[in-house]
Image (cartoon, rainbow, N blue to C red):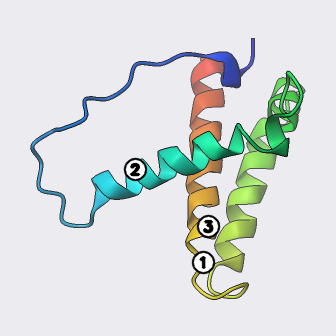
Amino acid sequence: MGIFSKRTKKLPESTGINYKFNEDKILTRLELYINKTYDQHYSSDKIQATEFIIDSGHGDGFCIGNIIKYAKRYGKKAGKNDMDLLKIMHYTIILLGSQDENN
């Protein structure tokens, strides 16, 4: 079973914390972005390419490589593009999820 088939609990909607850097709103945007990736061509098959790469033992390098790629690209392609930052966070989450599955 790959990381994309795992179910996790949802965090409570309201924590009562007054976030100084809009972390709650950014996390919501990140969740919406990730949800959209499941509706796109990345998940048109039963197994996503990323899941196959992770299951083949190459997940760490793949995720870290993509994190570096989008970090280096930020501010260069299409300016300071929020999508690059969302992709960095998504690959970080995938890496964390694959580490959790392996431990």
Residue at 82% x, 42% y is 42
Quarter placement of the N terminus? top right
Q: Secondary structure at mark 3?
A: helix
N-terminal of the pair, mark 1 or mark 2, is 2
In the image, 1 versus 29, the foreground residue is: 29
Residue underneath mark 1: 81
* In contact (CB < 8 Å): disc 1 and disc 3: yes
In the image, 17 versus 25, the foreground residue is: 25
Alpha-carbon distance for marks 2 and 3?
A: 13 Å
Q: Secondary structure at mark 1?
A: loop
- Residue 71 is situated, as x and y percent measured from the top left of the image, at 64, 71
Amino acid at pointer 1: Asn
Quarter placement of the C terminus? top right
Residue underneath mark 2: 27
Amino acid at pointer 2: Leu
Which residue is most to the top?
1
In the image, 82 versus 60, the foreground residue is: 82
Amino acid at pointer 3: Met
Residue at 33% x, 56% y is 25
Alpha-carbon distance for marks 1 and 3?
A: 5 Å
* In contact (CB < 8 Å): disc 1 and disc 2: no
The picture quadrant where one finds residue 68 is bottom right
N-terminal of the pair, mark 2 or mark 3, is 2
Residue underneath mark 3: 83
